[in-house]
Image (cartoon, rainbow, N blue to C red):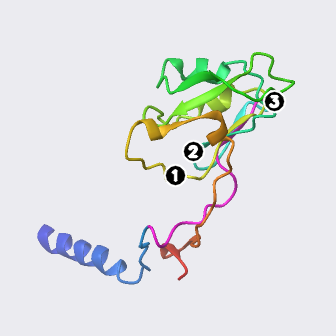
Amino acid sequence: MGSVSGMLKAIASGSKHLAIRRFTLRYPEQKLKFVGDGYQFDPKEGVGIAGYRGRHILYQDKCTGCQLCSIACEGIAEAIAMVKVDKQYKQNKKGIMPQIDYGKCVFCGLCVDACPFYALFMTDDYELAAYTKEHLIYTPDQLAIKPKYIGTYEIKIDELGAYHDE
């Protein structure tokens, strides 16, 4: 009797997936379109604003060189080093800004949480492949470039599950 009910449960479980739309993208030709900005932190409220944790973006005009992002990363990944920059900014007396090694970064977002000047955010850019370890080190000038979003597919969720339009 127990084996019959087990078989019926298995058939019911398998048949319910026949009605669910498939969720397959042909990467890299098809990419997801993320909604909203990347992960951010609001120090006044003390809460993180949800978002995908991809590559960082650095607003150089807001960075003061306080090194709090580097200190926050120190015990976790040690991926952030403060480097000297050529261009001088009036709010950055030291002339140093963060440089991130994505070979070491664990994308925890603590550096974003630590920045009281809203100078560092995480974006939805998740494509960080490189042929050498040196190419995974992003200088402050590289971090200042906004990522290009090419995604064309948006995730939709209903009673049949998650899917995307084609």
Q: Would residue 38 be found to the left or right of residue 126 on screen?
A: right
Tell me, yes or no, whether the highlighted magenta stretch contains residue 72. Answer: no
The residue sitting at 45% across, 67% down in the picture is 28
The secondary element bearing badge 3 is classed as: loop
Residue at image coords 28%, 76%: 14
Q: Residue furthest front?
A: 86
Q: Residue under label 2, please give it.
A: 55
Q: What element carries label 1?
A: loop
Percent coordinates x, y for residue 135 in the rendering: 46, 41
Of labels 1 and 3, the one closer to you: 1
Question: Which residues, given as a range, are shown in magenta?
Answer: 28-44
Q: Note whether 47 is above or below 64 in the view shown.
A: below
Q: Which amino acid does label 3 sit on?
A: Lys
The amino acid type, in three-letter code, at marker 1 is Tyr
Give coordinates of residue 27: x percent, y percent: 43, 68
Magenta stretch: dominant SS? loop
Disc 3: which residue: 44
The Cα–Cα distance between marks 3 and 2, rounded to whole angstroms, is 24 Å
Q: Mark 1 points at which residue?
A: 126
Say above or below: 78 vs 153: above
